């Protein structure tokens, strides 16, 4: 198949977005929110076809699954994006030089944004909304595991674009086959930036093979450290929420570290997890303490590979550490630099943790489940960047812009 035609049309469509007013883009997003809800039945029918192909025990199953409530959430995110002020045309710097050249630094779209993703049909709508609001064209390559769901959502988006007489190529959904991925990785000159969303293997493949600049949205290997001064009731609620709220997402908790001076509180700290059917992989000290209180069928002795694993399921590693320094060292060795948390009532320890942990989002006395674009007030997110160039953490509207220098003169020439 000649994929070049997709990329050429996408690039050409980008020029049509420049003339759209804020009122038009916001009206499209609000109409799309209503249209998705109105087409819930058809979308769920197509989603069921994808679910039928995937084992229910697969960690991706929950990400793939849509429901009336989840489609409602997607629609609400679209309305949230419409309500936000767009970042385009923002004057980032404004100065007049001694030679009277007037120089402004102005925010502009990235251009054509490519996204490769697995089993996450909500990404189709989220990415379109953020790209459309920022004047970017979205070229999407979903996985075959969500093919029917993605097509159903893209169909609704295109119908709304048609209604508003907007070039439907501002959203391009590539065919689900693997060849389309390789074509997108090589679409230099047509696609300006590529964002992978999915497993670590997918992210590694894109980074290693792309000829287009890549913004990595990495895996989430997430820790919560329960400090010597940690409040037990806060800890129980935070750890339970971070682990069980939605286990298949990248902000889900993977490892609890506990200060050795609070070891006797470990059974109480983790007791709610037993009701959530969470399987523990405990180091030697914590295993000896938990074996008399935690359900035997849910308790295992940890091996080294359990630390530094993104479980994406009802599994959790547990380790005893000597103090804050030991916790920081463990996190530095095993973190994916996504989200990390401390539970503590010691202001100095909290400050040290927040300052020293190298992650996109760091928390004190709160669940890592909040690492999410909508929760951060971004409306929605295109992904959570774990790198440091251009964007870091949840990526919303501002992260989908670059800038250009606008220089106004009156006949100046350089000597």
Image: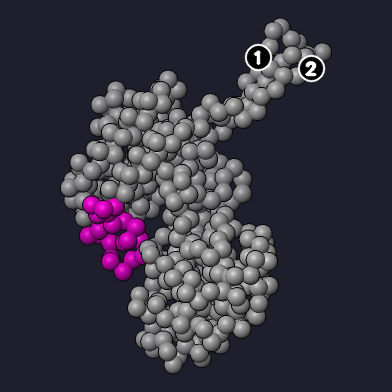
Q: Is residue 74 magenta?
A: no
Residue 322 shown left or right of residue 377 in the figure: right
Q: Earlier in the sequence, mark 1 or mark 2?
A: 2
Residue 98 shown left or right of residue 329 in the figure: right
Residue 27 lies, in percent from the top left, at: 32, 29
- For image coordinates 39% across by 77% down, the residue present is 272
Q: Nearer the viewer, mark 1 or mark 2?
A: 2
Residue 63 seen by the camera: yes
- For image coordinates 60% across by 75% down, the residue present is 229
Q: Is residue 19 above or below residue 28?
A: above
Mark 1: secondary structure: strand
- For image coordinates 55% across by 56% down, the residue present is 361
- Residue wearing tag 2: 98
Q: Is residue 358 above or below residue 325?
A: above
Mark 2: secondary structure: loop
Q: Name the image quarter holding residue 297.
A: bottom left
User: Are there few (<14), some (14-19), or many (20+) residues within 10 Å of tag 2?
Assistant: few
- For image coordinates 37% across by 29% down, the residue present is 25
Residue 180 lies, in percent from the top left, at: 39, 43
User: Are there few (<14), some (14-19), or many (20+) residues within 10 Å of tag 1?
Assistant: few
Q: Name the image quarter holding residue 5.
A: top left
**Which label was assigned to residue 408?**
1
What is the span of residues highlighted in magenta in the rendered image? Answer: 51-70
Q: Is residue 114 above or below residue 222?
A: above
Residue 5 seen by the camera: no
List the single residue furthest toward the right: 415
Residue 146 lies, in percent from the top left, at: 30, 52
Q: Nearer the viewer, residue 232 or 392?
A: 232
């Amino acid at each position: 198949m000649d994929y070049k035609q997709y990329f050429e049309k996408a690039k050409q469509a980008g020029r049509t977005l420049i003339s759209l007013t804020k009122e038009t883009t916001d009206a499209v997003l609000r109409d799309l929110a209503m249209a998705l809800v109105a087409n819930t039945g058809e979308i769920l029918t197509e989603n069921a076809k994808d679910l039928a192909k995937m084992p229910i025990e697969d960690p991706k199953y929950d990400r793939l699954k849509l429901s009336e409530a989840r489609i409602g959430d997607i629609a609400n995110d679209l309305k949230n994006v419409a309500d936000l002020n767009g970042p385009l045309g923002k004057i980032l710097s404004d100065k007049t030089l001694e030679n009277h050249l007037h120089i402004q630094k102005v925010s502009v779209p990235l251009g054509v944004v490519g996204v490769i993703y697995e089993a996450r049909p909500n990404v189709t709508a989220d990415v379109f909304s953020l790209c459309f609001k920022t004047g970017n064209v979205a070229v999407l390559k979903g996985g075959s595991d969500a093919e029917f769901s993605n097509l159903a959502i893209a169909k609704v988006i295109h119908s709304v674009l048609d209604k508003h007489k907007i070039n439907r190529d501002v959203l391009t959904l590539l065919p689900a086959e693997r060849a389309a991925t390789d074509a997108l990785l090589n679409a230099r000159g047509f696609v300006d930036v590529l964002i992978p969303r999915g497993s670590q293997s997918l992210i590694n493949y894109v980074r290693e093979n792309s000829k287009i600049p890549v913004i990595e949205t990495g895996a989430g290997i997430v820790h919560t450290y329960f400090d010597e001064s940690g409040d037990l009731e806060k800890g129980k609620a935070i750890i339970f929420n971070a682990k069980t709220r939605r286990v298949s997402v990248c902000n889900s908790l993977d490892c609890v570290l506990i200060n050795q001076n609070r070891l006797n509180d470990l059974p109480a700290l983790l007791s709610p997890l037993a009701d959530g059917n969470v399987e523990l992989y405990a180091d030697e000290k914590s295993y000896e303490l938990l074996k008399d209180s935690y359900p035997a069928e849910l308790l295992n002795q940890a091996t080294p590979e359990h630390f530094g694993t993104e479980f994406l399921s009802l599994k959790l590693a547990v380790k005893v550490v000597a103090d804050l320094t030991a916790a920081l060292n463990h996190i530095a060795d095993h973190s994916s630099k996504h989200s990390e948390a401390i539970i503590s009532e010691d202001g100095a320890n909290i400050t040290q943790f927040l300052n020293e942990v190298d992650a996109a989002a760091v928390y004190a006395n709160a669940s890592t489940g909040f690492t999410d674009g909508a929760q951060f007030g971004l409306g929605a997110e295109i992904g959570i960047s774990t790198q440091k160039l251009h964007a870091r953490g949840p990526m919303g509207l501002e992260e989908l812009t670059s800038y250009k220098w606008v220089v106004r003169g009156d006949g100046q020439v350089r000597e």
